[in-house]
């Protein structure tokens, strides 16, 4: 399957830009990041907390079949502008990666299409490069494909 999510990482910088156009109206794309039930479906993780407001926070957790925690992430929400922008921190538990800053910008292209631009800033160039050595690009593309598939059914 073609990778529709584009990841741009310039040498010597500690950030990446992720862009994706969706066959979804802007409001539905934003809802995929706003509503815990939808986030759980496309991310494949449990949303333990999601306070979508300035100075809010969130917490995700995934467990295996035996109940062991295999993924934890949390962060603080610094800006929450419906259908426009989310600025938050992101920190994974039990990993050597530090906190990253994420800026999500949502753009209406047509009545039925929209665009997401994610600007992710890491603590260091080394940390960013370490993330890029993992199957990060494939993972974000997979997640965005699931988002498109699941949210399309809400139209």
Image: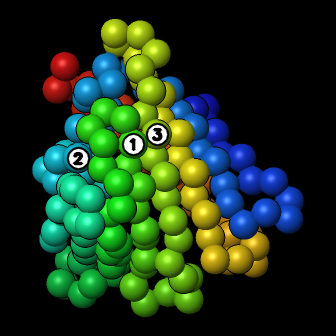
**Dot in front, 3 or 2:** 3
Marks 3/2 in contact by CB < 8 Å: the verdict is no
- Residue under the point 21% across and 55% down: 52
Q: Position of residue 43 (x, y in %)?
A: 32, 54
- Residue under the point 61% across and 63% down: 121
Quarter that holds the N terminus:
top right
Question: Is the residue 124 above or below the residue 101 in the image?
Answer: below
Residue 118 visible within the image: yes
Question: Is the residue 12 above or below the residue 26 in the image?
Answer: below
Sequence-first tag of 1 and 3: 1
Quadrant in which residue 5 is drawn = top right
Crowding at label 1, few (<14), some or many (≥20) Cα neighbours within 10 Å?
some
Q: Nearer the viewer, residue 29 or 43?
A: 29
Tell me the distance, in whole angstroms, between the alpha carbons under discs 2 and 1.
Answer: 11 Å
Give the farthest residue toward the right.
Answer: 11
Tell me the distance, in whole angstroms, between the alpha carbons under discs 1 and 3.
Answer: 5 Å
Q: Position of residue 66 (x, y in %)?
A: 19, 84
Residue with the mark numbered 1:
85
Sequence-first tag of 3 and 2: 2
Question: Circle 2 sits in a helix, a strand or a loop, which is it?
Answer: helix
Residue 145 placement, left or right of 133: left
Quadrant in which residue 122 is drawn = bottom right
Sequence-first tag of 2 and 1: 2
Residue with the mark numbered 2:
34
- Residue under the point 63% across and 39% down: 6
Q: Position of residue 123 (x, y in %)?
A: 63, 77
Q: Nearer the viewer, residue 122 or 48?
A: 122
Q: Which mark is residue 105?
A: 3
């Amino acid at each position: 399957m073609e990778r529709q999510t584009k990841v741009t990482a310039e040498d010597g910088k500690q950030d990446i830009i992720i862009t994706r156009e969706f066959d979804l109206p802007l409001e539905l794309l934003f809802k995929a990041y706003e509503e815990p039930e939808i986030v759980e479906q496309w991310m494949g993780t449990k949303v333990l907390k999601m306070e979508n407001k300035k100075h809010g926070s969130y917490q995700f957790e995934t467990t295996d079949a035996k109940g062991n925690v295999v993924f934890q992430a949390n962060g603080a929400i610094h800006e929450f502008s419906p259908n426009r922008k989310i600025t938050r921190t992101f920190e994974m538990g039990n990993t050597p990666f530090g906190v990253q800053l994420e800026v999500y910008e949502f753009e209406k292209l047509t009545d039925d299409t929209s665009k997401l631009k994610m600007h992710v800033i890491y603590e260091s160039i080394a940390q960013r490069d370490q993330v890029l050595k993992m199957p990060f690009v494939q993972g974000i593309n997979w997640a965005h494909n699931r988002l498109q598939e699941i949210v399309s059914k809400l139209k």
